[in-house]
Image (tube, rainbow, N blue to C red):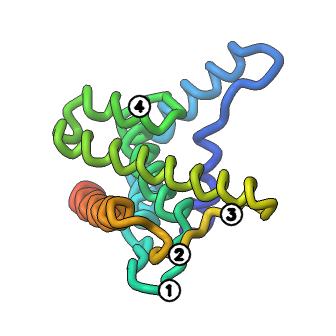
Amino acid sequence: PKSVLEAAIFFDFRFVAGDENLTNELKTYVTNEVQNKSVFLYHMAGNIIEAKLPATGNNKEIDVKKLLMPVTAFARVYSLKTGIPENNTLLRLSKIRDKNLIPVSFFNNITHTYRFLMQLRLDVQNQAIHKGEKPTNSILAESLNEFELVELKKSISIIADMQTRLSADFKGVL
């Protein structure tokens, strides 16, 4: 499973320089090959399902990037399962929705969660930079305003729902 987690990042490769056709050909090949590898997809899903979600009580430090990782991994695993070659998480989720793999309401919840967490992460890093500190992905739950704390708790709940959906869709694969 650790190797699967490390390999998952490979599926987000992008064209940087040289012949873009080579990148496109590799993306098509990899997407087609992985689509039929149920054991591999099972392990990818398992890593997401087993991710521990943080509590949001007082003095709790929350790594926002770690909260984002299951969302991006969710989009990645469904994209690989269905042959969607996109790299961008929001585009992946849109294509997954378009293929009716997730209901529109679930799509709306998960994209809202992704955007909220990404904005929270950027705000935390921006505040650190303005204070002359090293940017971080961590935030104390008690430093959030009431709206942010409610949104954070809602996001964690949506990620838990996402883990349940993955469990239902992938645990019976083997």
CA gap, disc 3 to disc 1?
Answer: 17 Å
- Residue drawn at x 50%, y 49% is 118
Foreground pick, 117 / 13: 117
Q: Which residue position holds label 1?
A: 59
Q: In this view, does 125 lie to the left or right of 102?
A: right
Q: What number is the disc on residue 140?
A: 2
Give the mark nearer the N terminus: 4 vs 3.
4
Q: Is residue 97 visible?
A: yes
Kind of residue at disc 2:
Leu
Residue 168, relative to residue 77: is it above or below? below
Nearer to us of marks 4 and 3 is 3
Give the mark nearer the N terminus: 4 vs 1.
1
- Residue drawn at x 71%, y 15% is 20
Q: What number is the disc on residue 160?
A: none
Kind of residue at disc 1:
Asn
Nearer to us of marks 4 and 2 is 2
Q: Which residue position holds label 4?
A: 83
